[in-house]
């Protein structure tokens, strides 16, 4: 999925693709995880390969992890690139709150509702279900002001998974950030507008110093 | 400090579409450390820029109002607003030319950038003019002792007497090419006089005269590229192209359709070392003697144990990066740009003199010096 990014940047940078717990080939442990654990796993990786001048590129959940990592271990990171990243508390529709409290009410009254939950949630099983809840309900709004790294925020204008107001909030929260919005409906911006987003990333990384 | 590189492509030319491919390829392959890449797309004599030009999709159905218009004044790029107002965008350190044929390869833009003292990655004006004109190329190559295919320049409105003369010198079948064109656009074959008339008629589209050449029997095309990097000429691998058709047509080269099965590419070409050595030596001589610069592709024809230098492309398609198999595209671009910046712009120096202080226009002496009083 990220091969277009990899192919374009491999000549000039050393690229490490991270496979998180429960994604791709890395197994998920038997106990539930917090967002912090994901961030610390990346820190482990950075320390293991003794990386310096780390540039984190995160898409969606990866962006959330990158933000978390930067708040707790900011000295390890040089720059941040966030593409359609999550991490901002979403504005929910009134229907959402109705569903939540209806479910809670049912729970109190000991009525079993087996078909509750989102599609993503239902696709998971075991400990990952709990992990999913932990991550989805963790927001980084209050932590943004501790991040002073140079940041590039790439966003697609008409994406429904991570709407545009999240990008604006990120831009406001992160001090040294620049926001680029592209006309696209896809959550996978770098697939839909690969050349343009690559051009922006290349421009952003143009004055990285090598030492 | 990042160096700002403009990649210029498109242009007024029959090879506009090929240039777009070359340009977009180069834009996406440009190294990012230490460089900022700015696209400039020339269409209908207007210059456009913007991030959208990094994507091939922008050209499939080009919408002029969706892109910024720019002009270059001095060493700076200005954005054109409505009502003709300008605002400065950025300065320019080097121009990477990716135009083929027409206004880009014939020295026009080279002259433009030379006048503005912006370094550019292409051969200078003089050699560009020679290499775009197939008739001039022939004469120049003959002058430095490189064998070329026999050929004659012929006006498209040639009288039958002139055609008689050409017929006497060359034999049928002949190949008729437009004088200034590439990518095999407008090339045709004539087996007899009727077909020659027809080709001349068709040649009117491309200019006032055409080049008529003797056709070589069972020939193969050998392509090689050379590039100047840090005052050293680097020679690429050789590519061998053979077709069932006697010469490469535009369809063969770019339309990967039904006919492309005829064309056989062999890369790197399996040819004997003696021929390879000859090609490399000839290429080096031509590159140095003609004072070329940047990536240049040389198209050779090999027929009956003889080697002919057929064509010199000062800005080849895809900047011939596919021929340099050992150098990645981005490194090649970086090296070309660094060499171009090192070369600087125009080499002409001004000559300080005191002429102006002694001239008196009113005295009736014209531009001549006024007599100095002793």
Image (cartoon, rainbow, N blue to C red):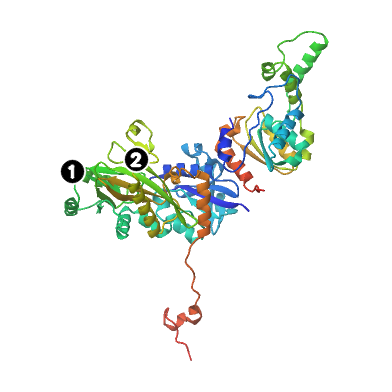
Report crowding for label 1: few under 14, some 14 to 19, many 20 or more residues within 10 A (C-alpha): few
Residue placed most toward the observer, B101 or A22 = A22
- For the view shown, which residue lies furthest in the front direction? B273
User: Taking B75 as reference, is B219 above or below it?
Assistant: above
> Which residue is under mark 2?
B241
Whether residue A14 is visible to the viewer of this picture, yes or no, is yes
Residue placed most toward the observer, B114 or B41 = B114
Marked residue nearer the N-terminal end (2 or 1): 1
- For discs 2 and 1, the disc positioned in front in the rendered view: 2
Return the x and y of residue B374 as percentages of the image width and height.
48, 91
Whether residue B79 is visible to the viewer of this picture, yes or no, is no
- For the view shown, which residue lies furthest in the bottom direction? B374
Q: Residue at x 73, y 25 (%)?
A: A136
Residue placed most toward the observer, A170 or B149 = B149
Q: Secondary structure at mark 2?
A: strand
- For the view shown, which residue lies furthest in the top direction? A111
Which circle marks residue A37 in the picture? none
Return the x and y of residue B301 as percentages of the image width and height.
30, 46
> Which residue is under mark 1?
B192
With B136 as the anchor, is B81 left or right in this view?
right
Report crowding for label 2: few under 14, some 14 to 19, many 20 or more residues within 10 A (C-alpha): some
What distance separates the C-alpha of mark 2 from that of mark 1?
Answer: 27 Å
Q: Residue at x 39, y 60 (%)?
A: B126
User: Taking A42 as reference, is B231 above or below it?
Assistant: below
Q: Residue at x 73, y 40 (%)?
A: A76
Q: Secondary structure at mark 1?
A: loop
- To which chain does the residue with label 1 belong? B
Return the x and y of residue B290 as percentages of the image width and height.
38, 58
């Amino acid at each position: 999925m990220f091969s277009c990014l990899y192919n374009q940047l491999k000549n000039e940078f050393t690229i490490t693709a991270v496979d998180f717990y429960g994604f791709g080939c890395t197994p998920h442990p038997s106990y539930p995880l917090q967002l912090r654990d994901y961030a610390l796993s990346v820190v482990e990786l950075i320390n293991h390969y003794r990386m310096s001048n780390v540039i984190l590129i995160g898409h969606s959940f990866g962006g959330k992890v990158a933000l978390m990592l930067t708040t707790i271990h900011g000295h390890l990171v040089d720059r941040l690139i966030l593409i359609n990243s999550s991490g901002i508390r979403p504005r929910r529709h009134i229907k959402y709150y109705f569903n939540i409290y209806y479910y809670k009410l049912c729970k109190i009254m000991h009525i079993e509702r087996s078909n509750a939950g989102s599609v993503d949630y239902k696709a998971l099983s075991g400990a990952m279900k709990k992990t999913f809840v932990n991550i989805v309900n963790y927001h980084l709004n209050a932590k943004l002001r501790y991040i002073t790294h140079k940041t590039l925020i790439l966003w697609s204008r008409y994406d429904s998974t991570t709407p545009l107001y999240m990008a604006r909030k990120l831009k406001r929260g992160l001090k040294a950030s620049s926001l680029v919005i592209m006309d696209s409906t896809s959550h996978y911006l770098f697939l839909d507008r690969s050349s343009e987003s690559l051009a922006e990333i290349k421009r952003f990384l143009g004055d990285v110093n090598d030492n | 400090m990042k160096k700002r590189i403009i990649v210029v492509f498109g242009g007024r030319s029959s090879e506009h579409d090929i240039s777009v491919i070359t340009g977009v390829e180069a834009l996406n392959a440009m190294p990012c450390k230490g460089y900022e890449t700015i696209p400039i797309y020339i269409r209908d004599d207007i210059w456009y820029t913007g991030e959208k030009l990094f994507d091939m999709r922008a050209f499939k159905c080009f919408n002029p109002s969706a892109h910024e218009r720019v002009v270059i004044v001095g060493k700076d790029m200005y954005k054109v607003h409505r009502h003709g107002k300008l605002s400065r965008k950025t300065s320019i350190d080097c121009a990477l030319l990716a135009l083929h044929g027409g206004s880009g390869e014939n020295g026009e833009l080279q002259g433009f950038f030379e006048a503005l003292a912006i370094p550019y990655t292409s051969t200078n004006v003089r050699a560009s003019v020679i290499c775009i004109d197939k008739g001039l190329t022939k004469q120049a190559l003959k002058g430095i002792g490189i064998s070329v295919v026999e050929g004659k320049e012929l006006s498209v409105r040639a009288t039958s007497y002139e055609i008689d003369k050409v017929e006497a010198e060359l034999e049928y079948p002949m190949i008729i090419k437009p004088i200034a064109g590439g990518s095999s656009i407008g090339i045709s074959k004539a087996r007899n006089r009727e077909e020659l008339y027809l080709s001349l008629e068709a040649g009117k589209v491309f200019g006032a005269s055409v080049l008529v050449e003797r056709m070589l029997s069972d020939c193969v095309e050998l392509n090689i590229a050379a590039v100047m990097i840090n005052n050293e000429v680097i020679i690429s691998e050789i590519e061998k192209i053979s077709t069932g058709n006697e010469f490469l047509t535009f369809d063969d080269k770019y339309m990967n359709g039904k006919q492309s099965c005829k064309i056989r590419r062999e890369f790197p070409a399996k040819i004997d070392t003696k021929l390879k050595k000859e090609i490399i030596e000839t290429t080096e001589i031509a590159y140095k003697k003609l004072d070329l610069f940047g990536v240049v592709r040389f198209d050779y024809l090999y027929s009956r144990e003889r080697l002919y230098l057929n064509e010199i492309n000062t800005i080849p398609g895809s900047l011939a990066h596919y021929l340099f198999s050992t150098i990645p595209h981005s490194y090649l671009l970086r090296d070309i740009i660094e060499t171009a910046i090192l070369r600087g712009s125009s080499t002409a120096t001004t000559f300080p003199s005191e002429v102006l202080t002694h001239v008196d226009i009113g005295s009736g002496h014209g531009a001549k010096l006024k007599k100095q009083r002793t």
